Image: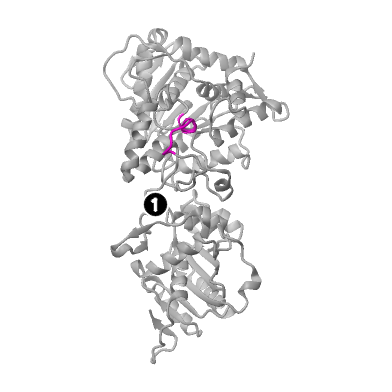
C-alpha cells in the first residue's frame, strides 16, 4: 500500500491534484529520490510517515477556534476538540520531513521552508509538528522552540500549541503547562516561545524549532542562531513558515530563492525541504525570466478570475479557508488598487514590492544580445554614478545605433570591506565572474575608478559623459584635464524624459543591455516616484536594493536624446546641462 506522502506526489504529477510549478518540483524530487535512493544514500521509512499522520489524527486535537492560521492568544481553557486530520498536502509535508532518513540512520531533512497563502493552516501544522517532536520523537531532553524577533510574535504560535494541548486529552495528561512552558517531566523535554530580545536566542540546544512568519524578519539573526543551536542534535529540525513578502533583500527572499534552486536542481542540498505554493506564469513568461504570473498576460494564472488555479496558492481552500471569503477579497481588491499588493502576497503567494517595479523584467530578459559589428561608427555617450566612499560605483557606455537601438556596456566598483559588511549580497559571486571590480580597503579607490573611466572614454571616443556633481565633481575636473567632455547632469525629475525613453527601449526590445547581471539586478530593483504633470524620477530610498547602474544609464540616455548644447567659451570641456 502506497503511503500518503508518495500518493500525494503521484497525484500531483498525474494532474489529479491541482498544484503550482514549485510544488510539482517538490513532488518530482520525492519520486526521483525514491527511485534513486540507494545511489543517493537515502532511506524512505513509510512507517514513520504513518506514525506522524496517526499522531495528528489520534492524539492531536484542534480547538474550535483553530480554523485557520489566524489564531490569537486566549485565556479560555479548551477541554475538547476535533481530531487534526491532515489534508493530502499536509501529509506530504510532515511525511517528507519525518519519513526520509540518511544511510547513517539520521533524519535527512534538518531545514524546512513552507510558503503557503494566508489561511492555509501553516501555523497549526507547524505547532502540531513541534508537539510531535516534544512528546513522540523518542528524544530525551528535547528542547523545542517557537522563535521570533519579539516575544509577542513568538507567543502567537505558542498559543496554538497551548490550545492543542488543552483540547487533546492525551497531551493534557502528559504535558505540564506553566507560563510560557510546555514540559514533559518524564523525558526532561520542553517547548517554549523565545525571541531575540535580551539575548533570548543564545545558548540553546535545539531539537525542534518553528520560525513562523519569516517574511516579517528584518534580519537573519533568529534563523542563524536557531540553526547553529542544532549542531549537537542528530534529528533536529528548523522549520520556517511564511507568506510571500516584498523585500528582495530579506532573509525570507534569500531562503525562498535558495529553496527554488534546490527544487530546480541547480543547488543540491539533501538536508533542505521546500514546499512553495503560488500561481504560475505561462510558459512564455517563464522562459522570459518571470517567476511569477504577469498581470497583463492572458495566459498566466490570474488572481482576478476564479478557477481551480486558485488552489495552487491555497491548497487548503475549502477546508480552513472558504471559497466565498477569497471571492470577497478578490472583489474588494478589484475596486481598490491599493489592496492588490497585499492580496497578491498574502492570498496568492506572489512576491511583490512596496513600490511598483519601473521596468518590465520579462521584456528586459527578452532584449537581444549585442552584435559587435553594429557598434562600429556609432556615437558613444557615458554615464557615471559615484556612490559614497563605501558604496557601489557605476559607469556605463551607451552606443546610439543608426536604427534607433541603443547598446550598453557597464562597469561597477566596490571596496573590499563591503564584501564582509554585506555577506548576504551576491557581491563576491559577481567579483569572481569578472562583473565587479573590488578595490582594496574600507573605501572605494576613486583613482582606480577615474583611470578606468578615462581610458574607456578615450578608447571608445565618448562624445559626452554625464555625471552627478554631488559626488563626482573632483573626478570630473580631473577627467576634463584629459580632454573628456564631462556634463553635469541634474538628478530627480530632470531625468523624466531619459527614464521614459529607457522604459520604451526595454518594452520594444531595442535596448541591448549586454545581460550584465549587476545591471539586470539593478533594473529589477528600480522603482520610480511620480511628480506633477506625470513626471517620474528614480526613487533610491524605496528601492529594494542598489540601482546606481540604472541611474548611470539614465544619465547617458539623457545626453543621447538631448539637443547638443553650446560649448561655453570660457571652458571648452565643461558643459552645464
State yes or no: residue 404 in magenta.
no
Is residue 138 in view? no
282 lies above or below 20: below
Quarter occupied by residue 109: top right
Query: Quick one: 73 or 506, which is closer to the camera?
Result: 506
Percent across and percent down for residue 432 are 60, 57
Q: Main secondary structure of the magenta part?
A: loop
**Residue that numbered label 1 is attached to:** 356
Is residue 302 in view? yes
Bounds of the magenta segment: 303-314
State yes or no: residue 310 in magenta.
yes
Residue at position x 51%, y 69% in the image: 396
**190 horizontally vs 150: left or right:** right
Q: Residue furthest right?
A: 39
Residue at position x 44%, y 28% in the image: 210
Quarter occupied by residue 168: top left
Amino acid at each position: 500500500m502506497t503511503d500518503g506522502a508518495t500518493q500525494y506526489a503521484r497525484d500531483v504529477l498525474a494532474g489529479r491534484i491541482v498544484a503550482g510549478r514549485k510544488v510539482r518540483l517538490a513532488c518530482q524530487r520525492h519520486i526521483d529520490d525514491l527511485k534513486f535512493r540507494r545511489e543517493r544514500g537515502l532511506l524512505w521509512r513509510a512507517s514513520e510517515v504513518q506514525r506522524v499522520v496517526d499522531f495528528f489524527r489520534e492524539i492531536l486535537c484542534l480547538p474550535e477556534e483553530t480554523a485557520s492560521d489566524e489564531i490569537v492568544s486566549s485565556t479560555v481553557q479548551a477541554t475538547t476538540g476535533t481530531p487534526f486530520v491532515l489534508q493530502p498536502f499536509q501529509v506530504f509535508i510532515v511525511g517528507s520531513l519525518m519519513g526520509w532518513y540518511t544511510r547513517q540512520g539520521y533524519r535527512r531533512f534538518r531545514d524546512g521552508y513552507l510558503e503557503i497563502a494566508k489561511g492555509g493552516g501553516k501555523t497549526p501544522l507547524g505547532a502540531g509538528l513541534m508537539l510531535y517532536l516534544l512528546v513522540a520523537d523518542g528524544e530525551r531532553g528535547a528542547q523545542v522552540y517557537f522563535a521570533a524577533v519579539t516575544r509577542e510574535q513568538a507567543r502567537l504560535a505558542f498559543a496554538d500549541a497551548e490550545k492543542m494541548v488543552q483540547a487533546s486529552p492525551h497531551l493534557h495528561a502528559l504535558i505540564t503547562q506553566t507560563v510560557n512552558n510546555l514540559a514533559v517531566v518524564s523525558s526532561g523535554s520542553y517547548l517554549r516561545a523565545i525571541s531575540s530580545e535580551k539575548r533570548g536566542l543564545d545558548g540553546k540546544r535545539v531539537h525542534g524549532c518553528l520560525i513562523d512568519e519569516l517574511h516579517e524578519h528584518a534580519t537573519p539573526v533568529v534563523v542563524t542562531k536557531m540553526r547553529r543551536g542544532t549542531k549537537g542534535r542528530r534529528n533536529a529540525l528548523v522549520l520556517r513558515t511564511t507568506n510571500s513578502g516584498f523585500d528582495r533583500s530579506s532573509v525570507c527572499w534569500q531562503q525562498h530563492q535558495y529553496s527554488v534552486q534546490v527544487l530546480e536542481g541547480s543547488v543540491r542540498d539533501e538536508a533542505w525541504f521546500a514546499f512553495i505554493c503560488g500561481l504560475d506564469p505561462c510558459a512564455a513568461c517563464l522562459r522570459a525570466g518571470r517567476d511569477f504570473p504577469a498581470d497583463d498576460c492572458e495566459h498566466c494564472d490570474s488572481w482576478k478570475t476564479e478557477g481551480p488555479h486558485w488552489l495552487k496558492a491555497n491548497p487548503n481552500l475549502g477546508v480552513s479557508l472558504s471559497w466565498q471569503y477569497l471571492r470577497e477579497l478578490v472583489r474588494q481588491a478589484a475596486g481598490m488598487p491599493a489592496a492588490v499588493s497585499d492580496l497578491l502576497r498574502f492570498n496568492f503567494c506572489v512576491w511583490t514590492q512596496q513600490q511598483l517595479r519601473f521596468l518590465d523584467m520579462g521584456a528586459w530578459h527578452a532584449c537581444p544580445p549585442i552584435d559587435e559589428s553594429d557598434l562600429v561608427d556609432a556615437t558613444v555617450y557615458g554615464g557615471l554614478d559615484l556612490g559614497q566612499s563605501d558604496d557601489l560605483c557605476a559607469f556605463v557606455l551607451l552606443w546610439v545605433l543608426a536604427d534607433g537601438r541603443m547598446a550598453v556596456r557597464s562597469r561597477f566598483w566596490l571596496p573590499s570591506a563591503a564584501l564582509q559588511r554585506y555577506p548576504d549580497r551576491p557581491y563576491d559571486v559577481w567579483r569572481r565572474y569578472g562583473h565587479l571590480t573590488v578595490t582594496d580597503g574600507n573605501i572605494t579607490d576613486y583613482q582606480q575608478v577615474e583611470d578606468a573611466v578615462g581610458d574607456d572614454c578615450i578608447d571608445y571616443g565618448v562624445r559626452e559623459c554625464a555625471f552627478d556633481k554631488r559626488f563626482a565633481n573632483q573626478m570630473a575636473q580631473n577627467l576634463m584635464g584629459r580632454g573628456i567632455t564631462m556634463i553635469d547632469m541634474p538628478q530627480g525629475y530632470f531625468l523624466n524624459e531619459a527614464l521614459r525613453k529607457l522604459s520604451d527601449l526595454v518594452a520594444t526590445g531595442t535596448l541591448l543591455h549586454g545581460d550584465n547581471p549587476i545591471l539586470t539586478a539593478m533594473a529589477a530593483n528600480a522603482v520610480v516616484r511620480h511628480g506633477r504633470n506625470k513626471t517620474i524620477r528614480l526613487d533610491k530610498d524605496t528601492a529594494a536594493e542598489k540601482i546606481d547602474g540604472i541611474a548611470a544609464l539614465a544619465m547617458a540616455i539623457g545626453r543621447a536624446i538631448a539637443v547638443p548644447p553650446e560649448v561655453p567659451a570660457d571652458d571648452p570641456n565643461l558643459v552645464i546641462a
